[in-house]
Image (cartoon, rainbow, N blue to C red):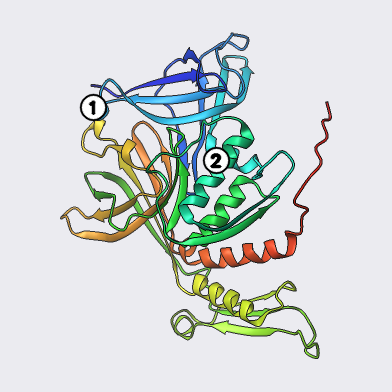
Amino acid sequence: MSKQYTIKIYDKAGTTFKGTLNQSADYTFQEIINGGLGEFTMTLPKKFDDTVIVSQLDQLQLWVQDNNSGTAGIKVYSGYIYKIIRTLGESEQAIQISAIGYGSRFGFTPDMDSTTNISVVRGSQHIDVMAKAIIDNFKTTIGDSIVNYSATSVEASATNISYTSNCKSVLETLEKVRQMSGSTWFWKVDADNIFYFKQLPTTPTHTLKIGKDLTALQIEENSDDIKNYYVLTNGLQATDTNNLAKGYYSATSVASYWKRFEKQVDGRVTDATYMDLLGDAFVTANQNENKLITFSIRDNNYGQGYDIETVHVGDTVRILNSKNVDLYSGNLVITGLTYTPQKLDVIVADARSITSRSLTDLRTSLDQTIYEDVTPTITLVNTD
């Protein structure tokens, strides 16, 4: 069967079906790791003042029917409508509709355990227990269960962590829990609005072959942004007992790429042990050339290719050359993708983003230490 698409519109609650929209084959949307579905945009061939069935915050679903999914189809996108643009031009008129995935709501929803308590204490909990508790609080705060976890979407863990969310958004809390869980954990919200909190696969989820599955492949190696000699001070005078000034370097990197100098003054650093952690993390993140791999996967409904609807962020890939020999046999982590009906454009984790993760976490921790002194309760005032 030929590849077909159906766009379904539901009300704000996602329960009442309102109808379908005119079909097109020009859909594009993105998916990112530690996030989920991004913006979906389509243009309706309507007159400027035509009546349409969509309203703000309605749920938009994109379904695909093809040789892989059959007539029943598979849902590949779900989001809420947040923008409607009516255009009147000299030669054409149109109505443009934009939606965005429900994971975006984490960013503007407070993590709280009552209407006035904006501080949530979560002490010594397993990783999976804490992740589920955050989503449970989120559902209570917003008053619906459009985003939920399933029996298997949050991976069980025996590791205990503790965290107090003080005037934080749900997104900030989730990111902090992910950071404390370790570099192998990720989260996302999929097209069924199921929340996932899991470890990255230890074996490749997909094996792709150049010339059959891949239509394009680019491997970029860049040494321009290498920094292998890092001087960090807290800005105090040498006579001050709290003065800290250290230099961190990689002898191996200096020998390979010349000495590449970076300096920073950060008055927030007052502990030598913490400074050493920052210095080591900075050099580790920047001492080697950066590698970025991007590729496109062709859809198998148009000849040779792959079932692109099965590829998602958090998956890992193995790439073979035309002779079935490993080009990249390790787990390349998919961190972002752009979906179109004919192909997927995929980004795998570049080396710099992987090695700088610990540095980012340390800086985030420092920011929170400095700026987190917020009262745990608030007084609500209705301005209507």
Residue 292: percent from the left, percent from the top?
A: 42, 58
Give the SS element for disc 2: helix
| Disc 2 crowd, CA 10 A, few/some/many (<14, 14-19, 20+) | some
Query: Residue 293, percent across and down?
Result: 38, 56
Residue at image coords 51%, 23%: 14
**Residue at disc 1, secondary structure:** loop
Task: Give the amino acid at mark 1.
Answer: Asn
The image quadrant where one finds the C terminus is top right
Eyeballing the image, is 222 above or below 187? below
In the displayed structure, 172 sits above or below 290; it is: above
- Picture residue at 51% right of the left edge, 49% below the top: 131
Please name the residue that numbered disc 1 is placed on. 67
Residue 136, numbered circle: 2
Q: Is residue 227 visible?
A: no
Residue 264 spot, x, y in % from top left: 68, 74
- In terms of image quadrants, where is residue 323? bottom left
**Farthest residue toward the left?**
323
Quarter occupied by the N terminus = top left
